[in-house]
């Protein structure tokens, strides 16, 4: 049996008056996901355990069968794994966003992506931060676009930090790190702002009418987690396809091999079809491939309704559609399509509501057709809720029992 997971990050949403009470997922044209929902096993999955902030880190750990309460220590160390940054037991890893802050004593978070800055420009800025501020204690590592890594060797992790995408347009002083060790972080952020203020990259960006990456925002801290590999748990060989360090890092801890795709950007210009084609090719040798697409989440954060609908349609057409065409060549195979969490247009950040999923098998007798299309409401009406979400992978792979044989 081959296993393929296709995840549209933040694809789920809330009904909108602008869409006549429909969600973006309902308004989008999604014939391939609709086919899977009609013919497969449709339901909702609760990926955010009570007490956890909704985010792709916690949600995707749940999707891959991990209980965040027992293994989640923060986003930073997961991203460090994909960057090849080794962490000692007392080291603290932080997500380091390049951001655009406004002027004044209490600057607003104008853009948590610094205009979706290109990776080559960002790498030069991060190198400058390392040259100016790096030392035996502090290290900066470049990632993709605005997403980077800061490591504090033998550092603190007990402080409270805030994701920058949660505070778009808000004054930032009250969201600065707070608690043990927070002043050290604030000092680093202040010094970084001085380094970035006069950098030639930012001078050119302002001249070209682009948002400058004039500050860093540190958050998502944690120490290296302890996780049993998914590949060991199920006796599988697997891979992960994503443009973002977070998902590749989770995959590495899960025992999955990162599979690189040319043109994968983590935005709406990503190589959708290439991701699906790479997954199908990899499944000739591997048993399990997890494909992550970031674009719908980015559009939700931007509050870009047309962009989110287009991203969902591209995901359906170029990722799900391409995968469906290739499934017959794999023989016995199962496909799981889902959103990890909602990123509603109305709030422009993540929400904890359950997300729709559909599981489908090329072995016809394993399916339980719903006759419904793929949407939040249809999944709710199907009457199947997987909670906690960490149980979804066990139902999908279903070792030693029938497909999606849910306990009564």
Image (tube, helix red, strand yellow):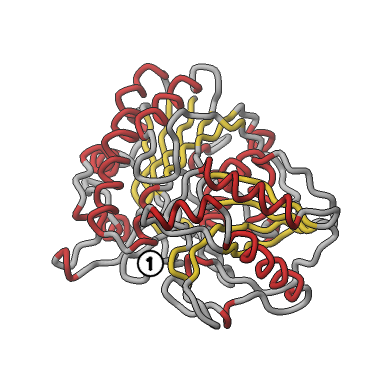
Q: Is residue 221 left or right of residue 373?
A: right
Q: How many marks?
A: 1
Farthest residue in the left direction? 20
Q: Position of residue 254 (x, y in %)?
A: 65, 40
328 to the left or right of 131: left
Instruction: Please tell me how crowded label 1 is: few (under 14), some (14-19), or many (20+) other residues with Cα within 10 Å.
Output: many
Toward the viewer: 175 or 231? Answer: 175
Measured along the vertical axis of the image, is residue 58 above or below residue 283? Answer: below
Q: Quadrant of residue 347?
A: bottom left
Foreground of the two, 224 or 394: 224
Q: Nearer the viewer, residue 262 or 277?
A: 262
Residue at image coords 30%, 58%: 376
As displayed, is residue 343 above or below residue 8?
below
Q: Is residue 391 visible?
A: no
In-front residue for pair 398/222: 222
- Residue 107, relative to residue 389: is it above or below? below
Residue 298 percent coordinates (x, y): 40, 54
Q: Which residue is mark 1?
A: 348
Residue at 51% from the left image edge and 65% from the top image edge: 54
Label 1 residue SS? loop
Name the residue located 39 percent from the left edge and 28 percent from the top edge. 274
Q: Is residue 367 visible?
A: yes
Q: Is residue 371 left or right of residue 401?
A: left
Q: Is residue 320 above or below residue 389?
A: above
- Residue 261: horizontal and vertical position, in percent? 48, 29
Q: Residue 305 at what x, y percent from top left?
A: 25, 59
């Amino acid at each position: 049996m081959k296993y393929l997971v296709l995840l549209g990050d933040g694809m789920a949403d809330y009904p909108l008056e602008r869409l006549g009470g429909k969600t973006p997922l309902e308004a989008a044209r999604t014939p391939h996901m609709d086919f899977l929902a009609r013919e497969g096993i449709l339901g909702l999955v609760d990926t955010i355990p009570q007490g956890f902030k909704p985010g792709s880190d916690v949600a995707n750990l749940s999707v891959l069968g991990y209980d965040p309460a027992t293994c989640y220590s923060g986003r930073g160390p997961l991203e460090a794994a994909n960057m090849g940054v080794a962490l000692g037991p007392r080291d603290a890893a932080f997500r380091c966003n390049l951001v655009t802050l406004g002027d004044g004593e209490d600057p607003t978070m104008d853009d948590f992506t610094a205009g979706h800055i290109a990776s080559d420009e960002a790498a030069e800025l991060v190198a400058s931060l390392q040259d100016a501020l790096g030392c035996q204690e502090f290290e900066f590592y470049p990632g993709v676009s605005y997403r980077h890594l800061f490591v504090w060797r033998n550092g603190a992790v007990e402080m409270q930090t805030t994701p920058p995408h949660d505070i778009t347009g808000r004054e930032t002083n009250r969201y600065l790190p707070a608690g043990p060790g927070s002043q050290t972080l604030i000092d680093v952020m202040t010094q970084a702002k001085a380094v970035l203020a006069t950098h030639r990259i930012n001078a050119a960006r302002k001249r070209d009418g682009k948002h400058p990456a004039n500050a860093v925002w540190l958050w998502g801290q944690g120490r290296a987690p302890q996780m049993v590999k998914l590949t060991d748990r199920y006796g599988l060989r697997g891979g992960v396809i994503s443009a973002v360090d977070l998902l590749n890092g989770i995959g590495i801890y899960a025992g999955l091999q990162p599979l690189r795709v040319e043109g994968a950007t983590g935005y709406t210009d990503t190589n959708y079809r290439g991701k699906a084609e790479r997954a199908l090719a990899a499944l000739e040798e591997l048993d399990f491939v997890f494909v992550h697409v970031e674009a719908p989440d980015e559009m939700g954060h931007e509050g870009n309704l047309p962009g989110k609908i287009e991203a969902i349609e591209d995901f359906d057409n170029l990722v799900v559609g391409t995968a469906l065409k290739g499934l017959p060549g794999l023989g016995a195979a199962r496909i799981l399509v889902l959103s990890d969490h909602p990123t509603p247009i109305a709030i422009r950040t993540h929400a904890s509501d359950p997300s729709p999923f559909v599981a489908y098998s090329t072995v016809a007798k394993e399916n339980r057709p719903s006759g419904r299309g793929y949407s939040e409401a249809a999944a709710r009406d199907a009457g199947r809720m997987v909670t906690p979400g960490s149980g979804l992978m066990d139902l999908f792979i279903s070792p030693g029992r029938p497909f999606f044989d849910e306990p009564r």
